[in-house]
Image (cartoon, helix red, strand yellow):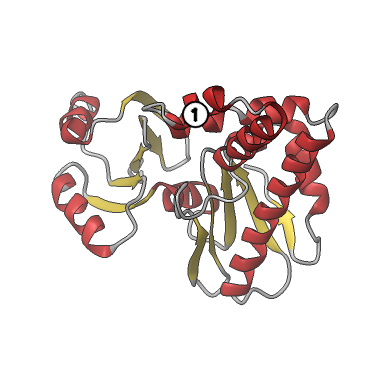
Amino acid sequence: MAKNKLTLFVDVGGSKTSLQLNDDKIRVLKRASFPTDLSSLVPQIRRFLKPLFKPDALLMGCRGVWTAPEKSTWKKKLRGLASRVEVMSDVELAHRRIFGRGAGILLNAGTGSIAYGRNPAGRTERQGGLGFLLGDEGSAFWMGRAYLKHVYAETDDLTWVRSFATHPDAVRRIAGLSTLVLRGARKKKALRKIVTMSRGHLLDLLDALRKKLRWTGPAKVALMGGLFQNKSFRDEFTKRLNPKKFRISKF
């Protein structure tokens, strides 16, 4: 009888780390999550695995880890925890869990925004994901910042606006304002315009990535992130996709 192979997925986000152990039939055997603390990550993984056999593979996705030296450093730290260790960005890991090693594009619109894809020939590219200072167009943060500008233009209330900009957790707090924008878009034209522009930026991300990948025919697209958890935003975004270029992949 063939051995049931185990794979441990380690998803290291900005605030939370999630561990999930799967068998080769993609059944979830064990889960855990805890606040992200990179200094104690390896001991936490060891504790998670302690009652179990060493998994056949450990796939870690870590936010912001894109370069070969960064991946190599983490691979050395994780050595011995599994028979095979792979390290990638959190976006690459999400793509692997959805598409395996197959072709497809992942569009993530949460606090930030990024598109990452693999074409049928195996070529990979990314678009966006430069952070709130240099990019993240169309993201929840972008939407929240646009809302602050709108409020200031209407009320001239600089104190309230600056309370967000100067907060120690400014990025998360400003991104949280996107819920007010989405909620008020039905009644207020200015907010509806912000939502429409956000969708436009995200569509531009997809088009730019498709061009980078030299994709011919429709590409499978998976949608992730907080903005796409809003049904109205997701449905309208899906309607605007060109079916000759993209088709939504469910996962």
- Residue 215 vs 138, above or below: the answer is below
Residue 223 versus residue 21: which sits nearer the camera? 223
Residue 181 versus residue 46: which sits nearer the camera? 181
Residue 40 versus residue 165: which sits nearer the camera? 165
User: Which amino acid type corresponds to the residue marked 1 in the rendered image?
Assistant: Arg
- Residue 172 vs 137, above or below: the answer is above
Spot occupied by residue 6 in the image (x, y as percentages of width and height): 33, 40
**Quarter of the figure with residue 24:** top left
Give the residue at x 49% y 54%.
100
| Residue 237 placement, left or right of 24 | right
Name the residue beneath numbered marker 1: 162
- Residue 203 vs 216, above or below: the answer is above
Q: Residues within 10 Å of mark 1 (few under 14, many from 20)?
A: few
Quadrant for the N terminus, please.
top left
Give the residue at x 68% y 25%.
180
Q: Is residue 213 visible?
A: no
| Residue 58 placement, left or right of 204 | left
Number of marks in picture: 1
Most extreme residue toward the front, as rendered? Answer: 156
Q: Secondary structure at mark 1?
A: helix
Quadrant for the C terminus, please.
top right
Spot occupied by residue 117 in the image (x, y as percentages of width and height): 54, 61
Spot occupied by residue 134 in the image (x, y as percentages of width and height): 46, 55
Give the residue at x 58% y 43%.
142
Spot occupied by residue 232 in the image (x, y as percentages of width and height): 78, 33
**Quarter of the figure with residue 167:** top left
